[in-house]
Amino acid sequence: MDVKVVEIGNDYVKLIVKGEDHTFLNLLQHYLLEEEGVIIAKYNIPHPLVGEPELYVKTDGTDPIEAIKRANEKIVKVCDELLSKI
């Protein structure tokens, strides 16, 4: 996965997430929307074959990068729990 920052501000970030598709981005969006302070979390894949996925996160003033990190940590935790039960 290659991540490129397109735009960043105090309460928003727009990223290009190369090498990912709906599988990861939908999961990330779900956990971002559960984060306190996240107002908007959405992604767009302009074209399924050649488009570069874009992720947009807007917060109420909290650091959007930290919100993305926390959401990813929750995903890792849930996956670890699932693997331990298999």
Image: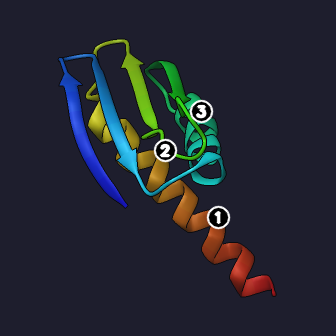
Q: Quadrant of residue 65?
A: top left
Q: Residue at x 29, y 25 (%)?
A: 13
User: Pointer 1: residues within 10 angstroms few (<14), some, or many (20+)?
Assistant: few
Q: Could you say whether the residue bearing mark 3 is in a helix, strand or loop?
A: helix
User: In the image, is 81 to the left or to the right of 41?
Assistant: right
- Looking at the rendering, which quadrant does residue 63 occupy? top left
Location of residue 72 with respect to 33 vertically, above or below: below
Looking at the picture, which amino acid does disc 2 mark? Val
Q: Quadrant of residue 59?
A: top left
| Residues at marks 1 and 3, CA–CA distance in whole angstroms | 14 Å
Q: Which coloring applies here?
A: rainbow
Q: Closer to the N terminus: mark 3 or mark 2?
A: 3
Farthest residue to the right: give it: 86
Query: Picture coordinates of residue 38 (x, y %)?
Result: 46, 22
The residue sitting at the front extreme is 50
Q: Which quadrant of the rendered structure holds the N terminus? A: bottom left
Q: Nearer the viewer, residue 2 or 71?
A: 2
Residue drawn at (36%, 12%) of the image = 60
Give the residue type at disc 3.
Answer: Glu
Position of the C terminus by quadrant = bottom right
Structural crowding at the residue carrying mark 2, measured as other residues with C-alpha within 10 Å and reported as few (<14), some (14–19) or many (≥20): few
2 vs 1, front mark: 2
Q: Which residue is mark 3?
A: 34
- Indicate the position of residue 62 as horizontal and vertical percent values: 29, 23
Instruction: Say what amino acid the circle numbered 1 marks.
Output: Val
Q: Specify the label residue 78 is tagged with.
A: 1
Compare marks 1 and 3 and give the one earlier in the sequence.
3
Determine whether 54 is above or below 1 in the image: above
Looking at this view, is 38 or 49 the one in front? 49
Q: In the rendering, which numbered label is found on residue 68?
A: none
Is 86 left, or right, of 64 in this rendering?
A: right
Mark 2 — residue?
Answer: 50
